[in-house]
């Protein structure tokens, strides 16, 4: 997914004269060719994330279209006030693209993990948050955002589904049936389908957790009053949006995501961490099954 | 106001060389009520702001959306009464907005300025340490568009405590942003001071530095005009801190 991002912005720099990539060292080696062709529109500020987002705001104030990229914790958490003030408060837009979703960087430890990124971005006015589940979806989302001046956050992941879907912002029904609705966000769809094999549930998917497509969610749920959301970031990130979508009727909702109650002080693989959080097929199935009792 | 009060004399400081604030500006300043707690820091920026808008910046009310206008970014968004008074004096903002009271419900003029609410205001500011990185980005954007417009950002000496400024100072110097100028209002507010001088911290990163009396209009105009070749410029403007003259001007204007 990450390589697809570098290839896509390299291409967009040639075709979009306002597009400017702002980096804090991460990714610059993969954009050297683009930097040579467009030295004024590939800006590496060094390991200075506050300046990176501030510079993006200043660029946007002059009519440029900034694309800002680094590791998720340094982009969203370290520079959060810059995201809030230098973009949102200035009423300008930017496309922020992070790498290292949740515990993708399990071996690096907590410093390189930001599972709260979706919740933090969704807490600021005017942002759209995408969690693509396939490199082709990432490319769709980046190309679409490049054509606008909107505030868009895309969280890339090393995890992906086997095949791409159309990342159009909507909640799409993937497996019809009766029983509870299970909504998979982004790259967890294949795991959710595996987890739900043989269970009387229907499965929907979206690459856009914020703003959540409430109409699509209601349509996928039909008359059902049981919903599970499998969100590969802070558990409950979409709880308020789900509650609002079903404000007119009682709905039991289960949110499967990164645990809020513990810092997982271990290394290993992303799959190891999935198991700790109950985000592996076994854990997902166990949580979905609670809706069937 | 056609008569000169004793408050005007204190504000305009007739004993200081090259200094002449127009009486109209002082009358407008007296109207900008509602943020009195910040009064002591108002006079430290008044002269710099007046000189910028009167004699330096290529910007006017009919050019607020002109992509080639010069940009002024007030990073130190505290005590904006002086900024608002200058914007009214230069026709960006109607005088009636001042009369509504700074920070009042329904007023477009708050204790920190909001670019969305006030024509001619280039950035919303208040939280310190945001203007300089934004100015670096604006200078980069203008350079990418091959525009000659200048970017001038005003910060305070205490504001430089915020580490985001250090990031921006290094980036601007290294990228040779010669259409960028930073005015540092130095009224000795930084709790731990700046041993070796404020200008040194910019110079070591590749900036051209100027030191100037922040109340001397002629010296300010000279220091703020033009730009360095291949290098951004810092203008350290020494000003008088804790000056009670605004409150005095208000009392006398209302008497």
Image (cartoon, rainbow, N blue to C red):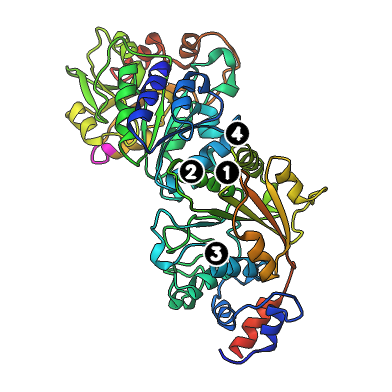
> Element type at marker 3?
loop
Q: Are marks 4 and 1 in contact (CB under 8 Å)?
A: no
- Does the segment drawn in magenta span residue A77? no
For the question of whether residue B96 can be seen, the reply is yes
Total numbered badges shown on the rendered structure: 4
Local packing at callout 4 (Cα closer than 10 Å; few below 14, some 14-19, many 20+) is: many
Q: Nearer the viewer, mark 4 or mark 2?
A: 2
> Element type at marker 4?
loop
Real-space Cα distance between discs 3 and 2? 33 Å
Real-space Cα distance between discs 1 and 2? 8 Å
Local packing at callout 3 (Cα closer than 10 Å; few below 14, some 14-19, many 20+) is: many
- Where is residue B25 shown, x and y percent of the image? 57, 78
Q: Which residues are magenta?
A: A245-249
Disc 1: which chain? B
Q: Which residue, given by chain and number where applicable, does mark 3 sit on?
A: B111
In the image, are marks 1 and 3 on the same chain?
yes
Q: Which residue, given by chain and number where applicable, does mark 2 sit on?
A: B143
Main secondary structure along the magenta-highlighted residues: loop
> Element type at marker 2?
helix
Q: Nearer the viewer, mark 4 or mark 1?
A: 1
Q: Nearer the viewer, mark 3 or mark 2?
A: 2
Q: Nearer the viewer, mark 4 or mark 3?
A: 4
Q: Which residue, given by chain and number where applicable, does mark 4 sit on?
A: A48
Q: Quadrant of residue B39?
A: bottom right
In the image, are marks 1 and 2 on the same chain?
yes
Q: Which residue, given by chain and number where applicable, does mark 1 sit on?
A: B177
Question: Above or below — where is B101 with respect to A187?
Answer: below
Real-space Cα distance between discs 4 and 1? 17 Å
């Amino acid at each position: 997914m990450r390589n697809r991002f570098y290839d896509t912005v390299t291409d967009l720099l040639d075709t979009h004269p306002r597009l400017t990539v702002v980096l804090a060292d991460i990714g610059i080696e993969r954009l050297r060719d683009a930097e040579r062709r467009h030295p004024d529109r590939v800006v590496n500020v060094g390991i200075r994330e506050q300046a990176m987002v501030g510079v993006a705001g200043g660029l946007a104030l002059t009519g440029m279209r900034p694309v800002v990229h680094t590791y998720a914790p340094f982009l969203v958490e370290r520079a959060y006030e810059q995201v809030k003030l230098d973009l949102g408060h200035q009423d300008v837009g930017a496309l922020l693209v992070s790498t290292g979703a949740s515990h993708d960087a399990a071996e690096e430890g907590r410093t390189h993990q930001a599972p709260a990124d979706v919740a933090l971005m969704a807490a600021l006015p005017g942002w759209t948050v995408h969690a693509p589940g396939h490199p082709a979806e990432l490319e769709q989302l980046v190309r679409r955002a490049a054509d606008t001046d909107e505030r868009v956050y895309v969280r890339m992941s090393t995890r992906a589904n086997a095949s791409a879907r159309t990342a159009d912002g909507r909640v799409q029904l993937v497996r019809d049936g009766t029983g509870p609705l299970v909504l998979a966000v982004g790259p967890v769809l294949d795991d959710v389908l595996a987890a739900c094999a043989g269970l009387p549930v229907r499965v929907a998917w979206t690459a856009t957790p914020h703003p959540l497509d409430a109409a699509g969610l209601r349509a996928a749920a039909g008359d059902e009053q049981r919903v599970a959301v499998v969100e590969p970031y802070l558990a409950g990130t979409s709880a308020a949006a789900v509650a609002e979508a079903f404000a007119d009727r009682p709905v039991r909702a289960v949110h499967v995501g990164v645990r809020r109650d513990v810092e997982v002080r271990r290394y290993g693989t992303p799959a190891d961490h999935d198991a700790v959080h109950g985000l592996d097929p076994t854990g997902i199935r166990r949580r979905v099954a609670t809706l069937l009792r | 106001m056609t008569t000169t009060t004793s408050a005007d004399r204190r504000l305009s400081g007739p004993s200081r060389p090259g200094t002449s604030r127009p009486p109209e500006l002082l009358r407008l300043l007296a109207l900008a009520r509602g943020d009195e707690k910040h009064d002591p820091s108002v006079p430290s920026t008044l002269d710099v702001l007046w000189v910028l808008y009167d004699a330096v910046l290529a910007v006017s009310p009919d050019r607020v959306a002109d992509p080639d206008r010069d940009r002024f970014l007030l990073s130190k968004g505290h005590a904006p009464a002086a900024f608002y008074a200058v914007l009214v004096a230069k026709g960006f903002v109607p005088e009636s907005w001042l009369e509504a009271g700074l920070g009042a419900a329904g007023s477009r003029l708050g204790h920190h300025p909001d670019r969305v609410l006030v024509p001619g205001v280039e950035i919303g500011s208040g939280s310190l340490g945001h203007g300089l990185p934004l100015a670096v980005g604006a200078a980069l954007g203008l350079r990418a568009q091959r525009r000659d417009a200048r970017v001038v950002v005003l910060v305070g000496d205490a504001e430089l405590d915020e580490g985001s400024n250090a990031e921006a100072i290094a980036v601007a110097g290294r990228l040779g942003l010669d259409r960028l100028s930073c005015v540092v209002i130095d009224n000795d507010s930084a709790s731990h001071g700046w041993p070796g001088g404020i200008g040194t911290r910019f110079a070591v990163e590749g900036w051209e530095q100027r030191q100037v009396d922040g109340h001397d209009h002629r010296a300010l105009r000279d220091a703020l005009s033009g730009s360095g070749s291949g290098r951004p410029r810092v203008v350290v403007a020494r000003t008088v801190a804790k000056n009670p003259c605004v409150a005095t001007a208000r009392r006398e204007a209302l008497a």
